[in-house]
Image: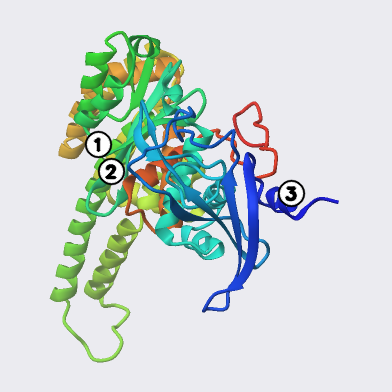
Amino acid sequence: MASTNTLIKNLLNVKNTVVESAKNYTDGRGVKHLRVKARPDKKHQYRCPFCGKKCPKDGRSSKDVRVWRGLDFGSVLVEIESETQRIKCPKHGSIVADVPWAYPGSHFTKDFDLTVGWLAVYLPRNAVAEYMRIDWKTVGRCISRTLNEIEPERAVRLNNLVYIGIDETSYKKGHKYITVIVNHETNTVVWAAEGHGKSVLEKFYRSLTKEQLESIKVVTGDGAKWITECVNEFTPGCERCIDPFHVVEWAMDALDEVRRGVWRDAYKKAQELKNSTPKRHGRPKADDLQAQAAKEARNKADQLKKSVYALGKAPEHLTENQQLRLEMIQTESPLLYRAYCIKERLRLILKMASVEEADAELKRWFWWASHSRIPVMQELGSKVKRHKDHILKTIQLGLSNARIEATNNKIKLIIRKAYGFRNIQNMLDMVYLVCSNLPISLPGRYPKPLSPCGCKA
């Protein structure tokens, strides 16, 4: 039969530890506690928590008693109490000696930190805080320690990069952005930092070695000038691709601006007809042509206002009502329908497999956009023409930023589940933890294997 000390050590899941005593008590709030008094064994005493070397005591400091939270035993709150000793490490200076049951600087056991990290991946942050009986901010610190345990060297992600995608996503109101870089081959985040622009992206490129820079062959992203400048400066032999999603987004923005202008004109006309119609008591007569014209003009304006999805969808995905609305636009608003056809033609060109055919079609599309007599579409044509080489390279290689856009959605979900982050580093650690193939497992359980696609089986 196991002794009490062995039983407590097994329940705490600690090694290199000597259990001296244990006692139960109830605090003023009626919560039951199990306080375990322990110490590192002789083999683990006076070791540096960072390099693991045995170091001499720091004679200028005295021992201090500290308490660490452990995983609860049912409804009983578990604590480990121990005396700490400061040591003098030749490399790290005067620091507190390591204890085998906790990470450096943590007031919780290793199992506790890992459990919080696992729960935070799947549950809202406030639910994790309430279940584990800790503060909301403490969850973020536990996440950082979990990530550091699973992946001590994050720079390993930067090795063997060939196809990467660059994008920025907002994490808070007030134009607060983070720049995210994804490895297209593994669909994982390899680098993330606060802010966006050339100065932020330069930090990524300057953190790479010469071999890592030479391994990058293709960079995808939107049409931002700062991405192109960094690619040309740090990896001049690299191919720069414009993501088709962003090119279509440019066209959609231009089309929507045309739609709003047409709608404003139609609404203004409807209002003028309404104001010029003499008011009558009771219902209008059936033969009142002016009132009927005002009503039809207002219906037309309403149809234009509600045509966003009909104009944005591909024709093969339109519903019956959206098809009718598009037919109405073709009949009643030739200007808007012409802008719609320009957008659709550009979308189809981006789906072509042959670069030669796409190049020829783009030349015809440029002429069409420049002669459309629609200023917004003329500006769109000039913008697409500036990025023509990068668009053709995208068609040739068949790459897109679809994966990084999916990663951005994951990041927004992380932020929404946590109800925002006050500490940007905690948020970045959470991004690294979730948007990667890191196997996170609960203490005492084997991690789930990864399938060939990089997802958990």
Q: Residues within 10 Å of mark 1 (few under 14, many from 20)?
A: some
**In the drawing, does residue 443 fall left or right of residue 277?**
right
Query: Measured along the vertical axis of the image, is residue 35 above or below residue 340?
Result: below
Going from the N terminus, do you reach mark 2 or mark 1 first? 2
Q: Which mark is residue 328?
A: none
Residue bearing the label numbered 2 = 177
Residue bearing the label numbered 3 = 6
Going from the N terminus, do you reach mark 2 or mark 3 first? 3
Residue bearing the label numbered 1 = 196
Query: Measured along the vertical axis of the image, is residue 196 above or below residue 121?
Result: above
- Residue type at mark 1 is His
Q: Position of residue 344 (x, y in %)?
A: 37, 35
Q: For residue 229, what is the image quadrant?
A: top left
Query: Measured along the vertical axis of the image, is residue 223 above or below residue 68?
Result: above
Q: Residues within 10 Å of mark 3 (few under 14, many from 20)?
A: few
- Residue type at mark 2 is Tyr
Q: Position of residue 403 (x, y in %)?
A: 46, 33
Q: Residues within 10 Å of mark 2 (few under 14, many from 20)?
A: some
Label pair 2/1, CB-CB below 8 angstroms: yes
- Spatial CA distance of label 2 from label 3 is 51 Å
Q: Position of residue 437 (x, y in %)?
A: 55, 33
